[in-house]
Image: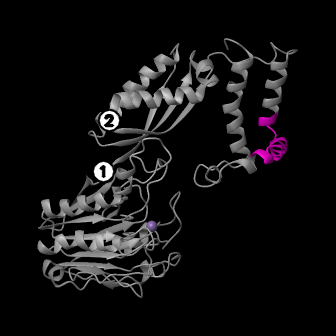
Amino acid sequence: MFRFLHAADIHLDSPLRGLEQYEGAPVDEIRTATRRALVNLVDLALQREVDFVVIAGDLYDGDWKDHNTGLFFVSQIGRLREASIPVVMISGNHDAANRMTKALQLPDHVELLSHRKASTAGNKQLRELGVAIHGRSFARSAETDNMVRDYPSRIDGMFNIGLLHTSLTGAEGHEPYAPCSIDELRQKQYDYWALGHVHTREVKCEDPPIVFCGNVQGRHIRETGAKGCYLVSVDQRGGVEWEFQPLDVFRWDLCQVAADDADRPEQVLDRFKTALADRMAMHDGLPLAVRVVVTGRTNAHPELAADPLNWSNQIRAAAIEQAGGRVWIEKVKLRTSTVRDLDPEAMADGPVGELLRYMTELRGDDRQLAELAEGLSDLRRKLPDDLLRGEEALNFSDPDCLRQWLDEVQPLVTSRLVKGV
Ligand SMILES: [Mn+2]
């Protein structure tokens, strides 16, 4: 009967983080990725001849640096006007009314629902199609009120869609904006809830469909895998089907390498190449930014642990050789361990035994860890700023963080002290 695209969190012109400082980083691919994902969205709408498009907030990443971001959106979305495809959208926390200092007049086939109160899209074409789209934009970035309560009642005889930017009752890693429960959404008796804000796509409820479509382009290593939108089809009897459609032009991925039973670092490299080939095939040849995590108890551990920088770069080189510039290694984490544990008792009288006992003691004592951190404060002051900020910041006051460093340091130290361990 009709079909539409449900997209959200385009974050147009958002920077992609984590590759900038990397020699040979795909700077152009990164800079234009969100724009090209938007182009893919418009292309898809035209190819599949959808009846309309909804965007559930965070079209923009924040206030524009200049008008170019807005002009790019207007020019792309304008291509839908020629095909008579209306667009209904709301703003989210990133592009809330109070954050945006610049604006452009939107083309008349694009409707941004009000941030003053919840309303129903007024587009005539949608009314004729029998579709009512209800929603409300964020007035300020931190909308912590339940917005759903004031959403309009369903209009009988129409297909009712709710457009909402929310973290529901709380989603890990997302600010608790516009909180509400699945039950509250169901009580509205709408036929489809098009949600935005949570960047991982998820169908929260099948009947009626309550759907997070995720963002259209991964922006850092915590946004791995295919990103895109949902193509939603509604049949004569109001039956709804939804199908994920990738739109991303560049993908973040995790490549796990099991090093168990490998005898030499070269074998670990071979396993990495096999694992990478699998990942590349899985992502249909899209350019990838990959985090490599090597784990396992292996005889290669002493060599790996003794010179992690060398082996990380061997892995980067292997990726270049294999992927010819289509894959960038975001980070290498060598998390291997030794095949046989060092036994402090066996070396009870030696300096290595002493060291291992000290490390074990440290690990179990938050107070001593805090003292250690205090002792490192001079070093901390010398660290560049970006190591102390962001998701993977070095946190000197977090005992768990300190314990993890101990785990990384121990093999490094012992492998240099004890040959062949
Ligand atoms: Mn958001």
Q: Is residue 57 above or below residue 333?
A: below
Residue 309 in magenta stretch: no
What residue is pinned by disc 2? 280
Q: Which residue is mark 1?
A: 249
Q: Amino acid at mark 2?
A: Met
Front residue (pair 131, 342): 342
Most foreground residue, 282 or 420: 420
Asked whether 34 or 68 is in front, the reply is 68
Q: Residue furthest bottom?
A: 116
Question: Which label sits on residue 209?
Answer: none
Coordinates of residue 300 in the picture (x, y in percent): 56, 17
Residue 336 horizontal side relative to residue 103, left or right: right
For badge 1, the amino acid type reads Val
Q: Is mark 1 within 8 Å of ligand 1?
A: no
Residue at the image position 32 percent from the left and 35 percent from the top:
280
Q: Quadrant of the N terminus?
A: bottom left
Dot 1 falls on a residue whose secondary structure is: loop
Q: Which residues are magenta?
A: 362-379
